[in-house]
Image (cartoon, rainbow, N blue to C red):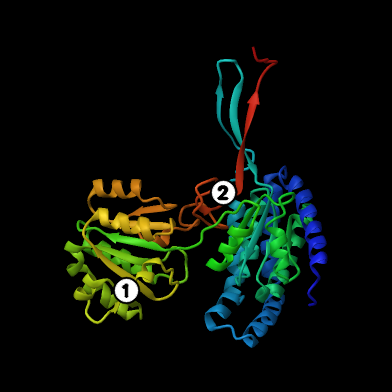
Amino acid sequence: MLKPQVSEITSYMEKVGRNAKKAARVLATAPTATKNAALKKIAQLLLDGQYGLKIQNARDLETATANGFDNASLDRLELTDTRINAMAEGLIQVSTLVDPVGELTNMQYQPSGIQVGKMRVPLGVIGVIYESRPNVTSDAAGLSLKAGNATILRGGSEALYSNQAIASCVHKGLVAVGLPEYSVQVINTIDRAAVGELIRMTDYVDVIVPRGGKSLTDRISREATVPVIKHLDGICHVFIDDEADPNKAIDIAYNAKTNRYGTCCTMETLLIGANIAKRVLPQLAKLYDSQGVELRGCARTQTTIPNIKPAVSADWDTEYLAPILSIRIVDDLDQAISHIEQHGSRHTDAIVTTNLDKANRFIREIDSSSVMVNASTRFADGFEYGLGAEIGISTNKLHARGPVALEGLTSQKFVVFGDGHVRQ
C-alpha cells in the first residue's frame, strides 16, 4: 500500500470525520432494538466469515513474522476460531445489556414549579487508537454502537488486513438493519500522520481512547487536543497487612500476579507487613518459583527469602507485564499507603486484612480508580464488575474512571419540564 502525502491524509481524515459526525446524529436516536439487531447480525457475520477472517489474519501474521515480531506479539495478533467466537459472544453480551441512552434520572420539582433532571446521552464520535489485538475492532465497535456513538478506529499497521476484514462484517451488519455504514470506520492507511490528524479533529471527534503500550498512550496524551480517556501504567499493589488471614493473603497475592502477566490489573509490587512476612513470604516464594516468577526484593525481603535479586529504585516504578515481581516489607499501613502514593499509577490497589478500620482507611486514602479489600487486583475488569465488556481502563478523575463500559461512553445533559413557567 502506497503512503499518501500529508495533504492527502488531511483530506482523507476530514472525510472520515464528516461521515462519522453524520452517522453519530443517526445513532443518537436509534432505537435500542435496532442497535441490538445490528450487534447480533455482526456477531453472526463474524462466525459465518471465520475462514475469510483467518485468511486476512494470516497475511498480517506473515508480515509480522518477517519483521521479527516475537512470539508474544504474534500471539496477540493471531485470530483463532476461539478468539473469533469470543468476539461474536462479546457482541451478543453487549446486546443484552441495558441501553443507557435516554435514561432520565433525579427528576425533582423546584420551588419555581419546574421539574429538573438529567438525561443520559451519547458522547458523539469516539476515536480509538490501538495496537496488535484485532479483537479490539469488534469490541470497541460494539460498545460504541450500543451507547449510540459513531466510532473511528485506527489499529496498528501490523493488523491492517485483519482489522479491515472485521470492519467489513461490521459494515454489512449495520447496513442490514438500516444504520449508516459510516457508524464504524477503520482508518485504511498505515501512515502515522493519520493519528496526528485524528487526535486534533475537535470539529468532528468528541473523545479519544488509546489502547496500547505506555509510549502510545503518552504520545496521545501529550499531543491530543481532543479529550482523552486513558491510563498510562498499571503499577498495581497488594498490601498484606499484619492482621491478614495468611491463607487468603497467599491465595490473593499468588492470583494477582500469576493469573495473567500481561494485563494492566496484574500486581507488580507486593507490600507486606513486617510481622507477617516470615510466615507468608517463604510459602509465596515457593509458589512463584513454581511458575517461574522472578522475585526482586528490598533488603528486608532478601533476609526472609535468600538468593532473590535485589530490587533497585526503578523496580518500584515499573509495570513489568511479565513474570517479575518486586517485594517490599513495610512497617505498617502508613508506610504501605506512602509507598503506593509515591510509586502507584492510580490504577488498582488492594489490601488483605481482617481489621475493618484498616480496610476503611485504605479505601479512603488510596487514590486509585479501583481499591480492593481481600480480593485480587485481577478483578479490575468491566466484565467482572458487572459492566459487560469495556473499551479500556481510565485513571482520569473527570468523566469516566475505572473500567469504561457503556455508561462511560455516555454523558448527561440537564432536562427541564415546565408548563408555561417564566422566571420571576
Quadrant for the C terminus in the image: top right
Q: Residue at x 74, y 55 (%)?
A: 183
User: As shown in the figure, which amino acid type bears the numbered disc 2?
Assistant: Gly
Q: Is residue 197 left or right of residue 289?
A: right
Q: Is residue 49 left or right of residue 251?
A: right
Q: Earlier in the sequence, mark 1 or mark 2?
A: 1
Q: Residue at x 51, y 58 (%)?
A: 231
Identify the residue position indicated by label 1 in the image: 311
Quick one: which residue is furthest to the top in this view? 424
Q: Position of residue 107 (x, y in %)?
A: 56, 27
Q: Is residue 335 left or right of residue 369?
A: left
* Secondary structure under the numbered disc 1 in the rendered image: loop
Marking on residue 408: 2
Q: Looking at the image, which is closer to me, 177 or 116?
A: 116
Q: Residue at x 66, y 20 (%)?
A: 418
For marks 1 and 2, give the CA distance: 38 Å
* Secondary structure under the numbered disc 2 in the rendered image: helix
Q: Looking at the image, which is closer to me, 288 or 104?
A: 288
Let me know if residue 137 appears in the view. Answer: yes
Q: Residues within 10 Å of mark 1 (few under 14, many from 20)?
A: some
Nearer mark to the viewer, of 1 and 2: 1
Image quadrant of residue 248? bottom left
Q: Position of residue 266 (x, y in %)?
A: 41, 66
Q: Position of residue 116 (x, y in %)?
A: 59, 26
Let me know if residue 175 appears in the view. Answer: no
Marking on residue 173: none
User: As shown in the figure, which amino acid type bears the numbered disc 1?
Assistant: Ala
Q: Looking at the image, which is closer to me, 34 or 148?
A: 148
Q: Looking at the image, which is closer to me, 16 or 42?
A: 16
Pointer 1 with pointer 2, Cβ within 8 A? no
Image quadrant of residue 51? bottom right
Residue 130, relative to residue 423: is it above or below? below
